[in-house]
Image: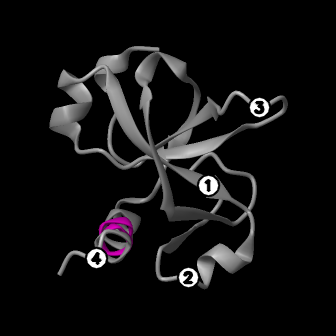
């Protein structure tokens, strides 16, 4: 994987180190930092519809995202990880969802 090409909104598989716990994540870090840093900020993606009901949840449709089912980004569950541990790129969230991600991040961090 070319780590210089990681962009906000990209969806990758990440291994959280628990047996069988590889899961999709979305890059939420800005693109300048994505180019310059060896780490990246990510949020977990789940198929649990209850996450979509939360103000920190963003629904992601299948298709271009590379996900096979309607899924939900949990912006209350974020991590900073080494880029080298991101594996297969699945796709990217649609551009319109970046605004929703930013709104959910503001809520998660209590930023006006």
Structural crowding at the residue carrying mark 2, measured as other residues with C-alpha within 10 Å and reported as few (<14), some (14–19) or many (≥20)? some
Q: Which residue is found at the position 31% from the left and 75% from the top?
A: 103
Helix, strand or loop at label 2? It is loop
Foreground mark, 4 or 1, reads 4
Q: Is residue 7 left or right of residue 64?
A: left
Mark 3 falls on what kind of element? loop
Whether the residues at callouts 4 and 1 have beta carbons within 8 Å, the answer is no
Residue at x-position 70% and y-position 27% = 17
In the image shown, does 67 or 72 lie closer to the viewer?
72
Q: Position of residue 41 (x, y in %)?
A: 37, 41
Mark 4, Cα crowd under 10 Å, few <14 / some 14-19 / many 20+, is few
Disc number for residue 110: 4
Residue at x-position 34% and y-position 62%:
98
Of badges 3 and 1, the one in the foreground is 3
Label 4 to label 1, Cα distance in Å?
Answer: 21 Å
Q: Which residue is mark 1?
A: 45
Q: Is residue 89 above or below residue 44?
A: above
């Amino acid at each position: 994987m070319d780590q210089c090409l990681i962009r906000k909104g990209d969806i990758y598989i990440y291994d959280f180190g628990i047996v069988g716990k590889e899961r999709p994540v979305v890059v939420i870090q800005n693109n300048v930092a994505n180019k310059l840093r060896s780490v990246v900020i990510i949020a977990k993606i789940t198929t649990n519809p209850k996450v979509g009901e939360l103000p920190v949840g963003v629904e992601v449709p299948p298709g271009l995202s590379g996900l096979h089912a309607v899924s939900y980004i949990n912006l209350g569950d974020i991590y900073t990880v080494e880029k080298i541990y991101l594996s297969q790129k699945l796709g990217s969230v649609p551009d319109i969802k970046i605004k929703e991600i930013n709104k959910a991040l503001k809520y998660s961090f209590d930023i006006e």
